[in-house]
Image (cartoon, rainbow, N blue to C red):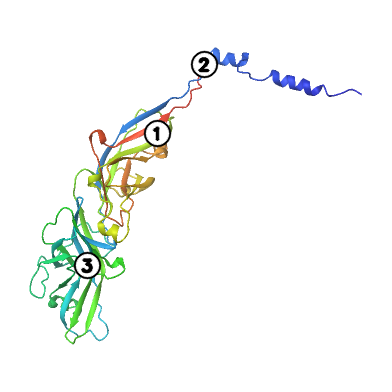
Amino acid sequence: MKSKHWIIPALLAFVLSCSSDPEGPVSERFLDDGTYGIRSGETHRVVVPVNAVTVSVPLGVGTSPFLNLGRQKGIEYRAILLKFDFTLASGDEAKTVSSAVLHLPVEIVSPENLKMPVTFNELLSGFSDADSITAIPPYDPLPIPDSLGRTVDTLGIESTDFDIDTTVVNGWISGRHPHNGIVILWAALPDSASSVEVNAHEYGRDPPAVQVNFTDGSSATFGSIDDYTVARFERGGLNAVGGIARRIACSFDPVGIPGRAVVHASFLVLRVRGDQGLGATVGEQLILGLSSLFNYYLYAPDSADTLSAGFRKGTGVARSLFDPAVSATIKLPIRAYMADVLAGARLNRGLVFQSDHELTRIQRASFAASGADAPYIEIIYSLPADFGGSR
């Protein structure tokens, strides 16, 4: 009987003879004579200039826990709107008001000794918390007087209850005079760093109210059902402001970068102007416990036309937070977005930066707009190794 053990050594010798030893003649042919020349990729860093502009968005915030009057970091809290529910309890329909007090629950003022002169005026049209109010609605220029005929009061931490004319209140309660609401206005320009913060009905306790005494000795309280801070921001420069609102539109052209580039990292780079930033009011921090950080949202808009509805919505690119009151350079990651743009998979309509709390909080982030600290886009990429050669 013949042995078959000789097959295994023979097969092993055959396999080894076919290996592609890098020092062998097969690899020498492809590398040395240039039949398949390999050029390794190189890593590049490119800085792309950004044209950034501030864009106004018609928006207001009517659901904050606090109402505000004053001025902070370029934001003007111009007016407080109040509307009350004057539904009478059974048996009170025919009663007459003998005295009335407007109760404004001031929670905190800044600076602590602030006393702000104000007037109370009747609104000529109604409003609701759900409205986007960007300007003070029409109002009667003649203020509502107090019981002594005075028309200017002082609002402060110790001044929260104000007599108001019973003729006006009787008209509201009886329905003889329409109640569209009242507006609280500055009677004089406040200091540039001042604020009075008052409970809104959303705060959950002690809301603004009209408290009345009737001629028969009974009393009633009518709380606010709608209240609103009307704020304005008119400063120049590059600003994102929540609640009013302002967004930043960024346009750029990454010209010269090949479509086959492999993007390793990319950032929208902004220089924060900390002296201009407002993360939270004193009341929001001390009483509500809200963070003073600025939550941002960066998106690729559906339209580059800043006047169109498509500009105000789009695909999210980045979302995070930073301190708007500290001067620093921040880098917003946009690698996946930039890779799509360079590959032609996404139209380059630019990017839009906004507050992620735009519907609920008034905040401001300000950025350098020109010079060495102007916005730019940083792209770090490499090109794939080139295996192209001639046979």
**Disc 1 and disc 3: Cα gap in Å?**
52 Å
Q: Mark 3 points at which residue?
A: 82
Residue 2 in the image: state x and y as whole percent.
89, 22
Q: Which residue lies furthest to the top in this view?
A: 33
- The 10 Å Cα crowd at callout 1, few under 14, some 14 to 19, many 20 or more, is many
**Residue 344 visible at all:** no
Residue 70, picture quadrant: bottom left
**Disc 2 and disc 1: Cα gap in Å?**
29 Å
**Which of the two labelled residues, at mark 1 and mark 3, occupies the earlier sequence position?**
3
**Disc 2 and disc 3: Cα gap in Å?**
81 Å
Is 230 drawn above or below residue 217 in the view shown?
A: above
Residue 330, picture quadrant: top left
Amino acid on which disc 3 is placed: Leu
- Marks 2,1: beta carbons within 8 A: no
Q: Mark 1 points at which residue?
A: 342
Amino acid on which disc 2 is placed: Ser
The foreground one among 116 and 85 is 116
Element class at badge 3? strand
Using residue 388 as the reference point, say whether residue 83 is left or right of it.
left
**Which of the two labelled residues, at mark 2 and mark 3, occupies the earlier sequence position?**
3
Q: Residue at x 24, y 75 (%)?
A: 222
**Which of the two labelled residues, at mark 2 and mark 1, occupies the earlier sequence position?**
1
Amino acid on which disc 1 is placed: Leu
Q: Name the residue under label 2.
A: 390
- Marks 2,3: beta carbons within 8 A: no
Is 191 drawn above or below residue 391 in the view shown?
A: below
Element class at badge 2? loop
Element class at badge 1? helix
Residue 230 in the image: state x and y as whole percent.
21, 59
- The 10 Å Cα crowd at callout 3, few under 14, some 14 to 19, many 20 or more, is many
- The 10 Å Cα crowd at callout 2, few under 14, some 14 to 19, many 20 or more, is few
